[in-house]
Image: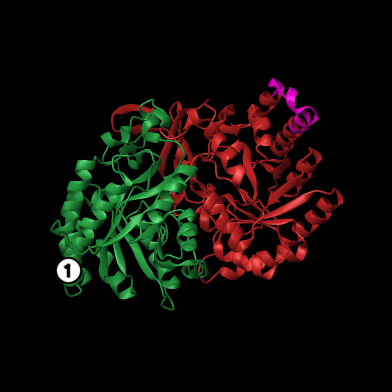
Chain colours: A red, B green
Amino acid sequence: MELLCPAGNLASMKAAFNAGADAVYLGLKNDTNARSFAGLNFNEQQLAKAIVLAKKQNKKIFLTLNTFPKPGEESRWYQAVDIAADLGLDALIVADLSLLDYAASKHKHLPLHLSVQASATNLAALQFYKENFNIERAVLPRVLSMKQVKDLAKVSPVDLEVFAFGSLCIMAEGRCHLSSYVTGQSPNTGGSCSPAQHVRWQDDGDDKLTRLNEVLIERSSKDQHLGYPVVCKGRYLSEHTHEPQHLLESPTSLNTLSLLPELAQAGIRSLKIEGRQRSPAYVAQVAKVWREAIDSYLRSPEQFVSQASWDQALAKVSEGQITTLGVYARQWQ
Amino acid sequence: MKISLAPIHYCWSKADTEHFYNQVAQSKVDTVYLGETVCSRRRELKFKDYLAIAHQLSDAGKNVVLSTMALIEAQSELTELKRYVDNGQWQIEANDMAGVQLASQAKLGFVCGPTINNYNRASLELLHKQGMTRFVMPYELSKAWLDNVMTPKPAFEVEVFGFGHIPLAHSARCFTAKHFNLNKDNCQTICQQHPKGLLVQTQDNQPLLRLNGIQTQSARCINLLSELDDMKQMGIDYWRLSARSIDDLVIAEQAFEQLAAPAISKADELQSHELGINQNTQLDCNGYWFGQAGMTSQTS
């Protein structure tokens, strides 16, 4: 089982490897990836340096090309594929059909992972991508229960990667337009979910207002722990309740430590940690806990028990300091 | 350009659904997309019920396309999808790549629905090779994007979502059930009691979303009636109406009349707005078409 960590920059990558990550995923400094926040990501020189460092430690690097090329601007995305092939990256994480086609036909030896943004949640969809582009692995969107993950793993023609820890995206990834509906920038085309320039916090007496492109998505007390503001985790009024509620989801993080044995037995190839926009300290903390947990499981699968100290350490770096099994637990749905 | 009718996004009773399609049979709609696309727990109408309606609409001269689910998670849902693909008479609208795969395996033509990620011409050409005869532009894309993608003119048809609440996202979680302290496995099909979805407003009372089971829609309603002439000139083949209720079939009549009439000038159009032809503008939006945030409203 691979521990796959996020690397927003070189410092995060080093932190991840030092803490025991087997691989990292990262993106280029442009709109070819869906985390195009200022100050994040890698230019070509930094990427080359990262590869040297990773190879020395026998670790892997996957390049995230998880946005969809815009008409007339496709060349930037094709170049990114060529860069990855030329630098000898370990895999490309891709969602767009034309990019998969380009990579599969031009760079036959470059392994392809299907990005979560492609939103493949079932056998037929996985078969489509395997038969047409020979993908090796697919990242599952956070919409399947643990039972559905197990059922799919039994028949999947490709390796599966699941989200193990991090901010909880509750919509089928790659097919959510909540952020673009409010801000005009789409994660699919190179923006990000709740782009930072559209977020505004404002004091109002004892309250704090959170606005996204001037739309009020939260009114909270000043001492309340808040996650990064996204539309799906705001508090709103429904037609017939006048108390503000988290009508979709509250600010929580996904933590599947307790599911580790089930994920391992299902044959899940890779455990993905979310958070390329988070600090090297976050990456180090999360990777350390998960390394310990995976090693503990592998040493004696039968005796595995999730440690309270692990959960406590992870809760500290979680949104709202709350964690959930989220979609994996049928009850949550 | 022709008028098409989106599949019903809400959970209506069997009687209401049948009544609706009786009216559709007599409407100016050319093409009808039919079927449950949101949640497989909605079982008011079964496969055979949809086929009966499809026959009725075909007999009335409508082109029928069987729409399939947007989010397919379980093997049972794939089995149901295969029944739709193998219906032997009508094309399907694939709203998940599973639909593309099964139709392509069966060597059947299909319509690529708006929830499949199509963001460039090369991807569309790939799908065309797999059997795609028509694609519905993803909701968040714009006129400028479409202009670019339609040059040179493609061999497949193009459809644009012109009216209705925008399906913005799909989740495993049923938000309607959650709101009533139910979980999905025991949802009591509570969404049937909300035939237009449930309005969600911000804490300063701005309408933002509509909860429709596992689907989250825009509170505002896309209204691209005023863009019909432009769309016709662009060579768009279908203008899609998503009805919020049976009353919205009047929008199809308006669109049909507008298409049949000689192109009106922008000044005339403004006047027709003032006369109240385009009612409910306060909750309309068209931002996506103009490359803006979807919820905004622009004047062309």
Neighbour tally class for label 1: few under 14, some 14-19, many 20 plus, Cα within 10 Å: few
Quarter residue B238 falls in: bottom left
- Does the magenta-highlighted stretch encompass residue A305? yes
Q: Is A175 situated left or right of A295 in this image?
A: left
Quarter residue B204 falls in: top left
Q: Percent from the top left, x then y, of residue B294?
A: 38, 53
Q: Percent from the top left, x then y, of residue A183?
A: 44, 51
B275 over B247 or under it: above or below: below
**Which of these two is toward me, A266 or A176?**
A266
**Which residue is found at the position 17% from the left and 75% from the top?**
B262
Tell me the quarter of the image containing the C terminus of chain B. bottom left
Q: Percent from the top left, x then y, of residue A234?
A: 44, 35
Look at mark 1 in the image and give the residue it sits on. B268
Inspect the image, locate mark 1, and give the three-letter code of the amino acid beneath it.
Answer: Asp
Pick out the residue farthest to the right.
Answer: A56
Q: Is A138 situated left or right of A236 in this image?
A: right
A235 over A99 or under it: above or below: above
**Which of these two is toward me, B101 or B284?**
B101
**Which residue is found at the position 53% from the left and 53% from the top?**
A125
A228 over A10 or under it: above or below: above
**Which residue is found at the position 24% from the left and 52% from the top?**
B53
**Which residue is found at the position 42% from the left and 30% from the top?**
B185
Majority secondary structure in the magenta region? helix
User: Which residues, given as a range, are shown in magenta?
Assistant: A294-309
Q: Percent from the top left, x then y, of residue B139?
A: 39, 56
Is residue A277 visible in the rendered image? The answer is no
A104 over B95 or under it: above or below: below
Q: Chain of mark 1?
A: B
Q: Is B206 situated left or right of A155 in this image?
A: left
